[in-house]
Image: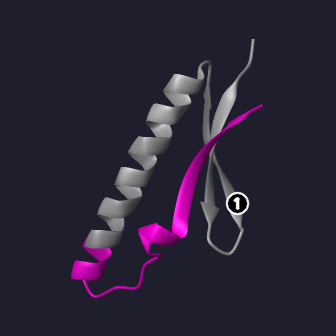
Amino acid sequence: MSKYKVVMIRSDGSREDLDEVFDSYEEASDYARESYNDFSSGAEVLDLAGETYTDPADVDFEVEEI
């Protein structure tokens, strides 16, 4: 049975595997959407605080089979 993971990919091509492993593509896809929303919310908070942050438009969360 296939397993899936979520990978955060920055616009410069760097990749970061997130820690969770999922039994279905759907679960991993839901987690990827949730991770993107959390990342966007964090960027908004940092922007309001005047801190530097990575623009959410420069980050993508993809599901990969492992």
User: Image height check: is 48 above or below 57?
Assistant: below
**Residue under the point 49% across and 42% down:** 32
Horizontal placement of 18 versus 57: left or right?
Answer: right
Q: Position of residue 10 (x, y in %)?
A: 61, 67
Q: Which quadrant of the figure has residue 28? A: top right
User: Image height check: is 7 above or below 5?
Assistant: below
Residue found at the very far left of the displayed protein = 48
Q: Residues within 10 Å of mark 1 (few under 14, many from 20)?
A: some
Horizontal placement of 23 versus 34: left or right?
Answer: right
Q: If the image is split into quadrants, where does the C terminus sit? A: top right
Residue that mark 1 sits on: 15
User: Image height check: is 52 above or below 46?
Assistant: below
Asked if the magenta segment contains residue 22, the reply would be no
Residue 6 vs residue 19, the one in the foreground? 6
Asked if the magenta segment contains residue 54, the reply would be yes
Q: Position of residue 48 (x, y in %)?
A: 22, 80
The residue tagged with tag 1: helix, strand or loop?
strand
Q: Position of residue 17 (x, y in %)?
A: 67, 49
User: Image height check: is 3 above or below 33?
Assistant: above
Q: If the image is split into quadrants, where does the N terminus sit? A: top right
Q: Which quadrant of the figure has residue 53? A: bottom left
**Residue under the point 35% across and 70% down:** 43
Horizontal placement of 44 versus 1: left or right?
Answer: left
* Magenta region, residue range: 45-66
Q: Position of residue 9 (x, y in %)?
A: 63, 60
